[in-house]
Amino acid sequence: MAEAAKLELEGKVYEIPVIVGTEQEKGLDISRLKATTDYITVDPGYANTGSCLSAITYIDGEKGILRYRGYDIAELCEKSTFMEVCYLLIYGELPTPEQYTKFKDKVLRHSLIHEDMKSFFTSYPGHAHPMAILSAMVCSLSVYHPELLAPDPSPEEMDETITRLLSKVRVLAAFAYKRSVGEAFVYTRPKLDYLSNFLHMMFTTPMEQYETDEVIRKALDVLFILHADHEQNCSTSTVRMVGSSKANLFASISAGICALWGPLHGGANQAVIEMLEAIAADGGNYKKYIDKAKDKNDPFKLMGFGHRIYKNYDPRARIIKKYCDDVLGKLGIHDPILEIAKGLEEVALTDPYFIERKLYPNVDFYSGILYRAMNIPTNMFTVMFALGRLPGWIAHWKEMIEEPGMRIARPRQIYTGAPLRKFIPFNQRGTYAEP
Ligand code: CMC
């Protein structure tokens, strides 16, 4: 039911249109607020701000629902593949067999990077964080594809850029890893699928060919599907923000990778394992860390807990937790960190601090345990998140670029600094305390 809210300001009443989404979510359309009232809205952290209308992903944080293009995440994990989900997110529908073959072939064909780029990797110090390298390399791809930088790309140019990115980013990620361990770069093999090729580029050495383990490949497929999109999160909003200036896709994704790196966002998966290892080294005393997380004078937070949107168990965490048990069982791995994570969760979920604030494990709480089981090193965890999130970033960039009447993203502010003052000449400024 279309309705309008009424806003009373300085004795005048204004009508604010209400926008209703597919699932009856409601928003106030304030796009004409400044023009009609001279007021703006203030919302630090954008917790109440809808930055766009989007047909890609639906989340109900109260009920713990996550759907891509209308499909439930659990069903996609069970019945689909990451490649198919990439297509679904980017193009809006599950591919027909013909579309799928064409898409897969195109992605496979673009898996080489310019040979000159290999020297970029070796110029970084061995300890460089792979997220720094990945972001720089993705932006550098633009240099090699000047034909794909048009501010208003044709559908063909758009497809070309999208498939190149999907293919090359996993190559860049694997090369960053190889650089960090001082091993030779490995190229893709035409017969392998998208994820098997990634594992091959990561773990094949001149001495030993990596043979894909089906348990690991399936677990990676599920992890990437679960990370593939999450509507207007920090990194996706960054991709949209940068892309709204009509910066090219490579530059926009590179910015998204930087946004993902932070420990409050994708960097949390690395922070979780470091936290669990610290707890293990400290004798496995969870209670002490729960108390630290509750102490407002202690900056410590329980990493992998809490979410801006989910006020219920994160559906992704539920699936990953189950996979941890299955995969570690099948691979015959006993990881004491998994026991610590489960113990920590159990204590937190019965503690009034976490109950009152509706803090539950999020996607990052258990994912690192699966990555460890695959021999992915801890500093690569956020890179893995980036590889999974790539189709979501691309889908949002494409949706935004194709939106008729798209405008540059440019929030406003309320200024709280000094009023107009007279300039003080250099020699009349006196002394002041060092900050
Ligand atoms: N440990 C302890 N207290 C917490 C935590 C936590 N992990 N998360 C939130 N709180 C408290 C917070 O201090 C606040 O308490 P109070 O009301 O007394 O001031 C209350 O819960 C509400 O939290 P908030 O800071 O308003 O929540 P937010 O929506 O601004 O932040 C968050 C969400 C995910 C950044 C935050 O929960 C957090 O820092 N979690 C740890 C980092 C993490 O796991 N990040 C991954 C997020 S999921 C994947 C992704 O986005 O990449």
Image (cartoon, grey):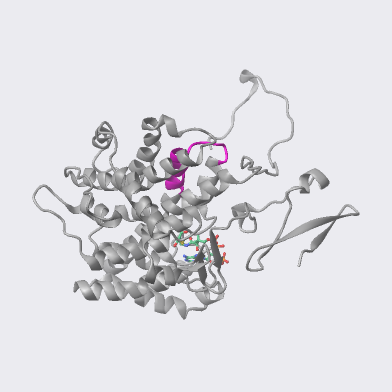
Where does residue 203 sit, x and y in percent of width and height?
Answer: 19, 53
Report if residue 160 lies within the magenta region. no
Front-most of residues 56 and 336: 56
- 166 left or right of 211 in image: right
User: Is residue 211 depicted above or below 135 in this figure?
Assistant: below
Nearer the observer, 116 or 403: 403
Name above or below for residue 356 compared with residue 410.
below
Camera-nearest residue between 344 and 85 = 85
Can you give x and y, in whole percent of width and height, for residue 336 in the image? 25, 72
Residue farthest front in this picture: 98
- First to last magenta residue range: 244-259
Kindly indicate the quadrant of the structure image that contains residue 221. bottom left
Relative to 212, 159 lies left or right: right
Residue lying at 22% horizontally and 46% vertically, measured from the top left: 178
On screen, 146 above or below 401? Answer: above
In the rendered image, residue 352, in percent from the top left (x then y), is placed at 52, 78
Q: Is residue 250 left or right of residue 215?
A: right
Q: Which residue is drawn at the image coordinates 42% and 68% (left, top)?
A: 76
Image position of 421 (left or right of 273): right
- Please indicate, yes or no, whether residue 304 appears anywhere in the rendered image: no
| Residue occupying image coordinates x 18% and y 43% | 182
The count of marks equals: 0
Q: Quarter-wise, where is residue 212 in the image?
A: bottom left
Q: Residue at x 59, y 32 (%)?
A: 432
Q: Which residue in the rendered view is the most extreme toward the right? A: 11
Query: Does residue 249 belong to the magenta stretch?
Result: yes
- Place of residue 269 in the rendered image (x, y in percent of width and height, measured from the top left): 37, 60
Q: Quadrant of the N terminus?
A: bottom right
Q: Please say whether residue 416 is visible from this viewpoint.
A: yes
- Examine the residues drawn in magenta and state their main secondary structure: helix
